[in-house]
Amino acid sequence: MTAHDHTRARELLCTWSRRMVRDGLVVGTSGNLSLRTGDLIAVTPSGVDYETMTAADVVLVDAQGTVVDGTREPTSELGLHVAAQARPGTVAVVHTHSPAAVALSTLSDHVPAVHYQLAMFGDGVRVSEYAPFGSRELVVNALAALGESTAVVLGNHGTLVLGDTLGAAYDGARQLEWLCDVWLRARAVGEPRLLPDAEISAVRGRFAAQRAKVRATAPTPAPR
């Protein structure tokens, strides 16, 4: 992995961080992102305005969370990212403070099956018990609720979504916020009619088959 590759990862975090603001998934400097780059992890810095953040502000850490390169303090949720990045297959992690998800976390212990899109996360999406931001307790609670899923709603806090690309993790964060919003809208006027577990399971299988097909037909990257 070259310095150019690390720079590219840092630039991508800047681009997607600004999109988080535009899409209403965060306010101010809340939320954070990480992206694996070789043996290192690029993470957004703490307290830096996303609109002015540059690649030089992004921090590189090793698998234990030790800063390897960068002058800024890494995100206060570094422990959450390091723990999530340790899961096999994870390349990118998106943490948001999206309003619909936070609102749902005060009302439910899971994301109800109001739409088949829930199947994209695998084993459902649960809500973790609340813990202070940046704490070890938050990491433990988040991992416990995450299970084998690729997303979790953090109680009274936000969301955490894992992906094999930054685009996939970000799409998951947006889809999760949409699911939470749909449930809240329906719940405001009545009792939502939910899809049965068997239907979600069937769609989960179809999603898995589609992903396998895409991987099988994807061109092999040219050697550097």
Image (cartoon, grey):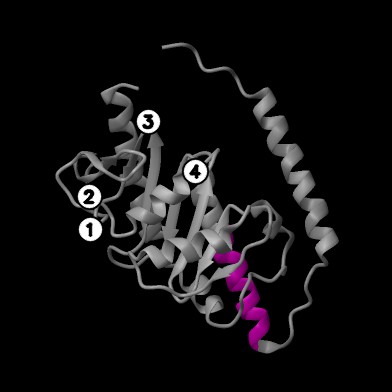
Asked if residue 183 lies in the magenta stretch, the reply is yes
Main SS, magenta residues: helix
How many other residues sit within 10 Å of disc 2, few (<14), some (14-19) or many (≥20)? some
Q: Amino acid at mark 2?
A: Met
Say which mark, if any, is on residue 49.
Answer: 1
The residue at 47%/39% (across/down) is 91
Name the quadrant containing residue 9. Answer: top left
Nearest-to-viewer mark from 2 and 3? 3
Label whose residue precedes the other's in the sequence (4 or 1): 1
User: Would you place residue 176 above or below residue 40 in this image?
Assistant: below
Query: SS for tag 4?
Result: helix
Name the quadrant containing residue 137. Answer: bottom left
Say which mark, if any, is on residue 53.
Answer: 2
Q: Amino acid at mark 1?
A: Asp
Are dots 1 and 3 in contact, CB under 8 Å? no
Query: SS for tag 1?
Result: loop
How many other residues sit within 10 Å of disc 3, few (<14), some (14-19) or many (≥20)? few
Nearest-to-viewer mark from 1 and 3? 3
Residue on which disc 3 sits: 39
Q: CA distance from mark 2 to mark 1?
A: 6 Å
- The residue nearer to you, when weighing 76 against 210, is 76
Nearest-to-viewer mark from 3 and 4? 3
Residue on which disc 4 sits: 167
Are dots 2 and 1 in contact, CB under 8 Å? yes
The residue at 40%/51% (across/down) is 81
Label whose residue precedes the other's in the sequence (3 or 4): 3
- The residue nearer to you, when weighing 204 against 116, is 204
Q: Amino acid at mark 4?
A: Gly
Q: How many marks?
A: 4
